[in-house]
Image: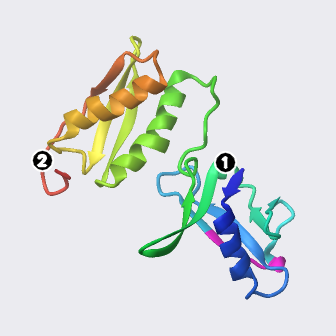
């Protein structure tokens, strides 16, 4: 479920050495399955372990505990510890935290919406924007609506056709394309 790099395991092992005996690591999601989902890592003292928690043993000799509500939203999570010229940083990438992964045989609209929420919106978030799937037409056009910094941005047509449409068509060849129904109004909220 969770992949922890060797460098992150060694980092956790060092941190745990300074904690009371039996303390482990907990990975969790606050508000799982929502746009405001937040992932975190904390110490997990022995007296906080619940019977329903999922335990994953790590090669470095400690366990990671996950509560049963967070578990489906932590599938495919990767934790790494990266050191570069600016210092060291623990990274946690949980692509399913905001929306639970859908099955490969789910209806097309669910699969398209999942890719938008899990892959497209994190890219747009760096500009303060987001996009929503409004509908999937009978002729397989994904009808989208932009919000936040994307609404009124001068680059929205480029983002739509060269970014989102190319990404969705590569993932779903059965799509005919994407269309934007946003009534764009430039303003201080716009990124560009």
192 vs 70, left or right, is left
Going from the N terminus, do you reach mark 1 or mark 2 first? 1
Residue 181 horizontal/vertical position (percent): 25, 30
Residue 163 within the magenta-colored segment of the rendering: no
Report the magenta residues as a range.
Answer: 41-47
Q: Is residue 145 left or right of residue 27?
A: left
The correct choice, above or below, for 182 with respect to 186 in the image is: above
Q: Are marks 1 and 2 in contact (CB under 8 Å)?
A: no
Task: List the single residue furthest toward the right.
Answer: 51
Image height of 17 relative to 116, above or below? below
Mark 2, Cα crowd under 10 Å, few <14 / some 14-19 / many 20+, is some
- Which residue position is annotated with label 1? 75
Label 1, residues with CA under 10 Å away: few <14, some 14-19, many ≥20: some
Q: Residue at x 14, y 44 (%)?
A: 185
Q: In this rendering, which labeled residue sits more in front, label 1 or label 2? A: 1
Q: Which residue is mark 2?
A: 186
Tag 2 secondary structure: loop
User: Compared with residue 10, is residue 70 higher up or lower down, i.e. above or below?
Assistant: above
**Quadrant housing residue 53:** bottom right
Residues 85 and 96: in front is: 85
The quadrant in which residue 103 appears is top right
- Indicate the position of residue 3 as horizontal and vertical percent values: 68, 55
């Amino acid at each position: 479920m969770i992949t922890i790099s060797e460098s992150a395991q060694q980092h956790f092992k060092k941190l745990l050495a300074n904690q009371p005996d039996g303390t482990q690591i907990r990975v969790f999601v606050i508000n799982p399955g929502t746009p405001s989902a937040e992932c975190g890592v904390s110490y997990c003292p022995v007296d906080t372990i619940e019977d329903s928690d999922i335990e994953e043993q790590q090669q470095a000799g400690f366990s990671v505990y996950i509560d049963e509500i967070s578990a489906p939203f932590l599938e495919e999570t990767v934790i790494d510890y990266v050191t570069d010229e600016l210092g060291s940083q623990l990274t946690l990438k949980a692509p399913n935290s905001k929306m639970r992964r859908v099955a490969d045989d789910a209806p097309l609209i669910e699969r398209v919406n999942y890719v938008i929420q899990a892959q497209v919106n994190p890219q747009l978030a760096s500009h303060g924007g987001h996009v929503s799937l409004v509908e999937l037409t009978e002729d397989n056009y994904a009808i989208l609506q932009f919000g936040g910094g994307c609404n009124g941005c001068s680059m929205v047509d480029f983002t739509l056709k060269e970014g989102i449409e190319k990404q969705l068509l590569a993932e779903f060849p059965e799509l005919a394309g994407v269309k934007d129904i946003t009534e764009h109004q430039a303003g201080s909220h716009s990124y560009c």
